[in-house]
Amino acid sequence: AQKITQTQPGMFVQEKEAVTLDCTYDTSDPSYGLFWYKQPSSGEMIFLIYQGSYDQQNATEGRYSLNFQKARKSANLVISASQLGDSAMYFCAMSTGQNFVFGPGTRLSVLP
Amino acid sequence: DAGVIQSPRHEVTEMGQEVTLRCKPISGHNSLFWYRQTMMRGLELLIYFNNNVPIDDSGMPEDRFSAKMPNASFSTLKIQPSEPRDSAVYFCATTGGFNSPLHFGNGTRLTVT
């Protein structure tokens, strides 16, 4: 069975600092995709970044990067230069060709 | 591209009433998912369709819930009869493939009194 674990229910970071949100996954499928989503207080789900299981390089999108460690089955999200607008819930998700599974989320609060 | 369109945005109903939530997927997306989000249980997958065919409905809570996808451009999630514990935000999300991101609608906030 596929499973996503996010062990940090809440995180605080000072504005302009970098922060890492943890995600570990479990699957027996050799082919899978890993995703991060942001959910601000307004409620919409915003796609941030994608990493394929066969990708050799870590994905980056602007201030977001994904630290993919396949052997450890981890896919941590790194946000550089945090902004007040980054305060939100962040969800890690995995697809395996059969399903999309989401983790419980991490609430990030950026402090001024 | 208008994105995934859900209606209504908000629904308030009394216990025992039938509720129908609607979703229009992005054109060309062949997989459609219904999720329910609550504070207690987070994001729960209820059911998903591939090419209009239900693939996995193991997340549907009970017989009061049903979902249909009569064609590639429309899906419904029905709750009959509704109960207060069904109060949640219901998301529809679609994708063109499992290595592509899910695109979410804005959700329907359901309140059952």
Image (cartoon, coloured by chain):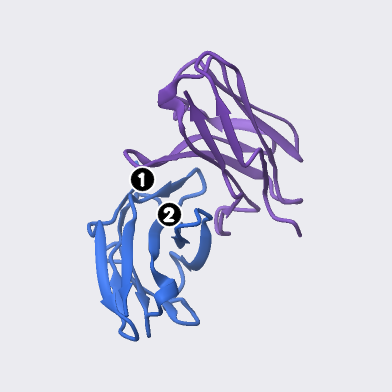
Chain colours: A blue, B purple
Establish whether labels 1 and 2 are both on one chain.
yes
Q: Is residue A105 visible?
A: yes
The answer to whether one can see residue A75 in this image is no
Residue B58 occupies quadrant: top left
Name the element at disc 1: loop
Q: Position of residue B109 (x, y in %)?
A: 53, 39
Q: Residue A39, percent across and down? A: 46, 58
Image vertical order of residue B13 relative to residue A67, above or below: above
In terms of image quadrants, where is residue A36? bottom left
Quarter of the image where the N terminus of chain A is located: top left
Report the front residue among A14 and A67: A14
Mark 1 vs 2: CB contact within 8 A: yes
The chain containing the residue under callout 1 comes to A
Kind of residue at disc 1: Gln
Residue at 41% x, 72% y: name it: A86
Q: Which residue is mark 1?
A: A2
Q: Is residue A26 above or below residue A14?
A: above
Q: In the image, residue A70 lies at what x, y percent?
A: 32, 67
- In whole angstroms, how far apart are the C-alphas of marks 1 and 2? 8 Å
Q: Which mark is residue A111?
A: none
Identify which residue, A35 or B10, lies in the foreground. Answer: B10
Q: Residue at x 32, y 60 (%)?
A: A107
Residue to which mark 2 is pinned: A94
Q: Amino acid at mark 2?
A: Met
The quadrant of the image that shows the C terminus of chain A is bottom left
Callout 1 crowding tier (Cα within 10 Å): few <14, some 14–19, many ≥20: some
Q: Residue at x 68, y 34 (%)?
A: B75
Residue B26 relative to residue A6: left or right: right
Q: Chain of mark 2?
A: A
User: Is residue A9 toward the left or the right of residue B112 in the image?
Assistant: left
Q: Tell me the element at label 2.
A: strand
